[in-house]
Structures are given as structure tokens and as C-alpha cells.
Image (tube, rainbow, N blue to C red):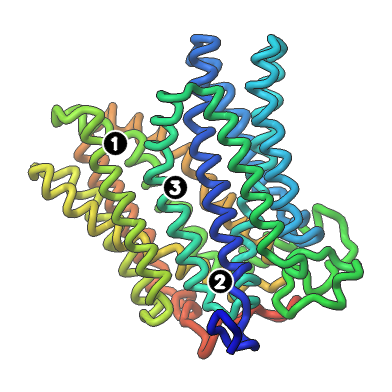
Amino acid sequence: MNRRGRHPSAPSRRPLAGLVLAQACAYTGTRLALVAVPWFVLTTTGSPADMGLVTLCEMGAYTLARLLSGPLLDRIGHRVVSVRLDVLAAAAVLCVPLLHAAGLLAFPLLLALVTVIGLATGPSETAKVSLTPFVAAATRTRVERVAGLTGTVDRFSQTVGPIAAGAVVAAAGALNALYANAVLMVLASVVLALLVPRSLSTAPGTAHDTDASPASDTPAPIAPTGYVAQLCAGWRAVWGDACLRALVLMIMVTNLVDVAVMTVVLPVWAEDGGGGAQTVGLVAGVLGGASVLGAVTAAWIGHRLPRRFTFFAAFLVSGPPRILVLALDVPLWAVLAVWCASGLAGGLINPILSAVLFERLPADMTGRGIAVVGALARIGAPVGAPLIGLAVGLAGTSPVLFACAGLYLLATTLPVLGPAAAAMAAPPGPSPVRTPGAPAPPA
């Protein structure tokens, strides 16, 4: 035993702490920017149209970069990409208040800067997620536990982040909030660089390869093919696996419904009931807070739960009941109780999903696979909200809620009946990182 009571052969927990802290800093900064940038645009231009254009540039660049950056992650290394792009994002954010103070921030330049921010944060977030299995292997921690801890950070930032961001913007102003955002992005880069070993991100062919641990996130060089060919290989790694294909299709549909319900149907329901914006905040806050508790539970005991049953049961509890209760004439406390239960169940989903993804993707396809899954999971959400908003205007809130609950139920039930669900079973023993090129387990 050493002075800290740890056996000399026990792995260091520094990479795990580094990944979690880096994600906490980056996600907090991102949530801060989501409030500060639009508010800055509104207060300086007074134009909602300009706000929409800025959001379109940033989020469009973010989504496109996430979709196309997979080969870059697998070529250079996830840690390296995350460290460098967080600094780039911080520099772009910092330019906004500095150029504005100097009177040099023309609107086209602002659009260019937010586009750079989106192009940097998309791959950077994907890189951090892709580091999960390698950090798990380096620290001898189950993937479900690492994913549960990072998922808790994500859920917490989604719940508390916008509220805290609004308070910071209100108290200090949008420009100071942007300075804070830049500092947080730099901290995320520094923490990851200091606490996560270089062996987790050494590019193929460098001198560090000889010292790389089995958990290295670039264990073998990628075949010397073109960028497009590597991108297509990542697509085939996901879409060619029956289990992953079924899960991606399910998540595409459920995300579409979730975004539409939260952004369109819930506000309409609250207004119709006379509750107003405070009711929307209360309901969403209960859901988010409960999901944090669910993610903490998953990090603690998630690996001990029956994987397939827990995953699909959590989807069934987190989706249809939460949607259906809005269509019923029940008191607010009943709605809050149902949404609390749905949040607890929803917090269990992502750690299990992450474990399945990392087990089935070859190690040299992790970056590309996660990028493809992340892009496909979000691809339907921008389309779903306008369509469901139109449906609410034509048919009313209750019929749309019943239809959404039915669609959600169908999307989560069909995979259970197919052969892909059987492939979700957890492998015996610890969650390993498979070697490059190794075939996925049979679906």
C-alpha cells in the first residue's frame, strides 16, 4: 500500500476525474453561450430575425461538424481533438466581446465567429464522449459507470445550466457571460490535457505509440484511404450492425417526439391550463432533476441491472406516460409525479446505450461511429417540432398528445420484438475495449 492507501498496482483514477471535470466545464460553458449569445444579439441588434440567423449558423455548423468529424477523431486521437478545439472555441467566443468593445464586430463577422464556435464544439463534444471506453479501460472501471458519471454531468448541465446562465446574464450582462464561457472552455482543455494521459490520444505513427497502453484510443493506424471512404466506413459500422441500426432508428423517433413535446406541446398545454411559463419551468425542472438522480443511480448500480429489461422498461416509463398525462384532466401535482418518475427512468438510458455502442463499435471506429450515431439521433428533431406544431393548430393538443404517445410506444416496442434486442445482453466480466478490426458480436 502507498501513503494514500491504494495498492501500487491499482490504476489511477485521474483520467476518469479529468474526463468528468472537462465535460462539466465544457457543458457549462456551452449552456452559458446558448443564453448569452442570443441575448447579446437581441440587445445589440433588436432583431429576432438576427437571433434566428445566429442560432442557425452555430447549430448548423455544430451538427454538420459532428456528422463529418469522425475520421478526424480516429486519425488524430480523441483527446488531442478535444484539447485543441476547446481552445479554438474559447478564442472564437472571446473575440465577440473584444471586437464589440473595439467597435469592430460587424454582423457578418459575428456570423463567422459563431460558425467557428459550432464547428469546434461539435467535434470536441463527440471526442469527449468517444473517450469513455478508453478511460474505462485505463482506470479498470466499467463502461456503464463511466457513462453514468458523464451522463450525470450532462443531465445536470441541461437542468441547472440554463437557469444559472440566465442568472449570470441578468446579473453580469451578456458580454461578461461570454468571457466566463471562454474561461470555462479553456479550463476544459487544460483539465483534459493534464489529467488524461497522452497515450489515450497519441496519433498513429508517433513515438508515443510504443508506450501506449492497451486503452489507447488509437491502437492501430487507420487504413490509408480517403476521408470520404473513412466516413462511409463509420456509417457501415453503425448501419451494418442490426442491433445498432435498431437502436438508432428508435432514438431518432423518440428524440423527434421529445423535442416536439418539450418545445411546442408543453408550452401550449401550460397556456391552455392557465399555468403560464412558470408551469413549464416547474414541469421541466422536475423532469431534469429526476433525470440527474436516475443518471447517478445508473453510475452506481447500473452494471448490476438486467440490461435489456432495464433499457426498454426505462424507455417505456420515461416516454408515453409523461406524454399521456398532459392529455388527461388531472391536477398539476399528478403531472409532476408522473414526470418525476419519467425523469428517474430516463436517467438510466444513456449509460446502457453508451455501453452497447462502445462494445459493438471496433476501437478504431469509435470516433466515426459516435459521430454518426449522434448526428442521426438529432436529425429528425428540427423537422418534428414544426410538423407537430402544425398538427396542434389543426387538431388540438389532446389528439396530438395521444398520437405522440402512440408513436413513442411503437418506436420503443418494435425493437424488443426483433432479434436485435438479444444482442444487447451484457458480456460476462468487465466491459472491454475491442481491438481494431475485431468483428462486432453477432446481432
- Could you tell whether 257 is left or right of 62 in the image? left
Marked residue nearer the N-terminal end (2 or 1): 2
Q: Amino acid at mark 1?
A: Val
Question: Which of the 4 quarters of the picture holds residue 95?
Answer: top right
- Could you tell whether 196 is left or right of 301 in the image? right
Q: Residue at x 50, y 61 (%)?
A: 150
Q: Which mark, residue 287?
A: none
Q: Position of residue 372 (x, y in %)?
A: 63, 55
Q: Amino acid at mark 2?
A: Ala
Q: Amino acid at mark 3?
A: Ser
| Label 1: few (<14), some (14–19) or many (≥20) C-alpha neighbours in 10 Å | many
- Badge 1 marks a residue whose secondary structure is helix
Q: Residue at x 63, y 21 (%)?
A: 97
Q: Position of residue 200 (x, y in %)?
A: 73, 68
Whether residue 246 can be seen here: yes
Mark 2 or 1, closer to the camera:
1
Instruction: State the separation of the CA atoms marked 1 and 3.
Output: 23 Å
Q: Is residue 335 above or below residue 386?
A: below
Q: Position of residue 329 (x, y in %)?
A: 9, 42
Between 168 and 359, the residue placed more toward the observer is 168
Q: Position of residue 43 (x, y in %)?
A: 49, 13
> Which residue carries the number 2 mark?
242
> Which residue carries the number 3 mark?
157
The quarter of the picture where the N terminus appears is bottom right
- Badge 2 marks a residue whose secondary structure is helix
> Which residue carries the number 1 mark?
265
Q: Are marks 3 and 2 in contact (CB under 8 Å)?
A: no
Instruction: State the separation of the CA atoms marked 3 and 2.
Output: 33 Å
Q: Residue at x 53, y 74 (%)?
A: 143
Q: Are marks 2 and 1 in contact (CB under 8 Å)?
A: no
Q: Residue at x 30, y 47 (%)?
A: 404
Whether residue 437 can be seen here: no
